[in-house]
Amino acid sequence: MSALIDPGEVEFSAIRAQGPGGQNVNKVSCAVHMRFDVGASSLPEAIKERLLALSDQRITQAGVVVLKAQQSRSLEQNKEDALRRLQELVDSVAVLPTVRRATKPTRGSQRRRLDSKTKSGQTKAMRGKVSE
C-alpha cells in the first residue's frame, strides 16, 4: 500500500544554509524548509493516522511535517532531497507491521529450560566452602 505525495500539497520556502561556505553562503538562499500538512493531504486515512501517531520531532502538534534540506548548493537538488525524505517517511508508515501471535512453549523446551536451571544451581552449590 504505497501512497505517492503530490508535490502541489508541499510548501517550500528558501532559507540561508547553515555552516561553512565562505562569502557565498551569506548571499544565496539555497537551503529549503519544506512543510507538508498531513491532515489536508490526499493521503489515505490509514496512512495519515499512522503518520500522525509517529513520535517524530519533525511532525508538529498541528500535524505538519517540517523538513530542512541543505546538503546541496543547488536549490532544486535540496527540494528533491526534501521530497525524497518525505516520501521515505510516508513509505515507512505505509507498511503494516506483522501482528505477533503468542504461542505456548513446547513441553520439550520447558523441560530443557528447567534442566539447565537445575544443572546451573548444582554447579553454584558446589562452589561453597569445603567442609570435612
Image (cartoon, helix red, strand yellow):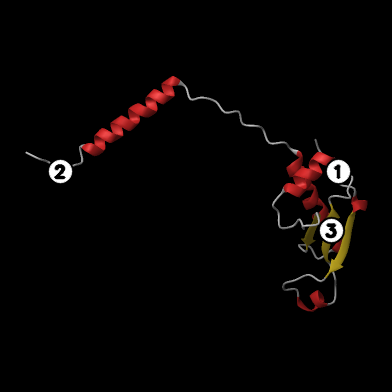
Q: Residue at coordinates 81% horizontally, 57% vertically from top-left?
A: 62
Density class for disc 3 (Cα within 10 Å; few <14, some 14-19, many ≥20) is many
* Three-letter amino acid code at the position of disc 3: Arg
The x, y position of residue 128, in whole percent, is 18, 42
Side of 23 relative to 105 (left or right): right
Rendered-image quadrant of the C terminus: top left
The x, y position of residue 91, in whole percent, is 77, 43
- Find disc 3 in the rendering and name its residue: 35
In the image, farthest residue toward the bottom: 23
Measured in 3D between alpha carbons, the distance from the residue under mark 3 to the one under mark 1, in whole angstroms, is: 15 Å
Q: Residue at coordinates 30% horizontally, 34% vertically from top-left?
A: 120
The x, y position of residue 35, in whole percent, is 84, 58
The numbered dot on residue 11 is none
- Camera-nearest residue between 93 and 78: 93
- Find disc 1 in the rendering and name its residue: 43
- Find disc 2 in the rendering and name its residue: 129
Q: Which secondary structure, mark 1?
A: loop
Establish if 19 lies above or below 6: below
